[in-house]
Image (tube, grey):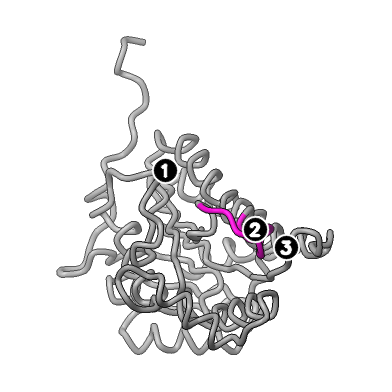
């Protein structure tokens, strides 16, 4: 075979019909952990961009609540109770989406958990729980959708990493390691599937005002001997842009990465943290 004549990735525009004025019209997006926080904001952002949205969420009630909000925006929505740590649930998720909506164009691996502890206090259970949800599930959810995306010769996977994956921390080592793992697997999946028209990127949020942040502030405050409110106040003061982050700040960047506007980006870990991390 002559040099440069091998299989080429599909051009990342025009393959799927788009509704007028809609960046993701005609496409189907899955958002894990889409019942609250960044996941909910992302589901709504993708719907506003024209996508039909699958809310894959452990809590059936919150999944349906977000799905209803998506439908109110004029898009189709499925609420799928899903435990991302179970491969059988991930297989069922993919089968259900294909049966109901016919395709999978976007996967947002958002589901995650947090626990703080000093290194000498980390147990095997703590380590395994964090790594199972935050890293292992990201890989196997991606693995579950990849055959569909490969057959379509297109797809976008956006993983939720964190600024924690780019820096060290004395109080939440397993969490930081899990998010660094997400950055690494993002790059490896991007390389593995670029020629099949599949892009894989991740976002690295900072201090986001969500239910998870409530847990972060409580746990970190306890370790440091201060109140959750004081912990949040101190963290907010370190943000160059001068405020805590909102879920919508992260969702806007995820929407960009899922769209054709980011069609020449893959393997990237984008910091969305108000300027907290200004490297890599």
Whichever of labels 1 and 3 marks the residue nearer the N terminus, that label is 3
> Is residue 273 found left or right of 119 in the rendered image?
left
Helix or strand or loop: what does disc 3 sit on?
A: loop
Identify residue for label 1: 267
- Name the element at disc 2: helix
Q: Which residue is drawn at 46% across and 43% down?
A: 150
Residue occupying the point 73% across, 67% down: 117
Of badges 3 and 2, nearer the viewer stands: 2
Q: Residue 97 location in percent, x, y? A: 52, 66
Residue identifier under label 3: 86
Res 11 label: none
Q: Which residue is drawn at 60% across and 76% down?
A: 216
Residue that numbered label 2 is attached to? 137
Cα–Cα span, label 3 and label 2: 8 Å
Residue 208 percent coordinates (x, y): 45, 75
Q: x%, y% of residue 261? A: 23, 54
Along the line of sight, which residue is nearer the eye, 232 or 175? 232
The magenta-colored residue range is: 167-176
Badge 1 vs badge 2, beta-carbon distance below 8 Å: no
């Amino acid at each position: 075979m002559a040099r440069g004549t091998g299989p080429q990735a599909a051009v990342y525009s025009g393959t799927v019909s788009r509704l007028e004025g809609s960046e993701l019209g005609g496409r189907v997006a899955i958002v894990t952990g889409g019942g609250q926080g960044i996941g909910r904001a992302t589901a709504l952002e993708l719907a506003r961009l024209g996508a039909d949205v699958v809310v894959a969420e452990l809590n059936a009630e919150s999944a349906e609540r977000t799905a209803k909000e998506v439908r109110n925006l004029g898009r189709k929505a499925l609420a799928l109770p899903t435990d991302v740590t179970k491969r059988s649930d991930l297989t069922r998720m993919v089968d259900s989406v294909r049966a109901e909506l016919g395709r999978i164009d976007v996967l947002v691996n958002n589901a995650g958990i947090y626990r703080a502890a000093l290194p000498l206090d980390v147990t095997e259970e703590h380590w395994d729980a964090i790594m199972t949800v935050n890293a292992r599930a990201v890989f196997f959810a991606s693995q579950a959708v990849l055959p569909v995306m490969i057959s379509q010769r297109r797809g976008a996977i956006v993983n939720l990493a964190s600024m924690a994956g780019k820096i060290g921390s004395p109080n939440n080592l397993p969490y930081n390691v899990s998010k660094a793992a997400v950055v690494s697997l993002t790059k490896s999946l991007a390389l593995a599937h670029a020629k099949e028209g599949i892009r894989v990127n991740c976002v690295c949020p900072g201090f986001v005002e969500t239910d998870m942040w409530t847990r972060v502030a409580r746990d970190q405050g306890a370790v440091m001997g201060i109140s959750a409110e004081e912990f949040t106040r101190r963290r907010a003061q370190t943000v160059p842009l001068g405020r805590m982050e909102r879920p919508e700040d992260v969702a806007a960047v995820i929407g960009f990465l899922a769209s054709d506007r980011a069609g020449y980006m893959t393997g990237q870990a984008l910091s969305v943290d108000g300027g907290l991390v200004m490297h890599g």
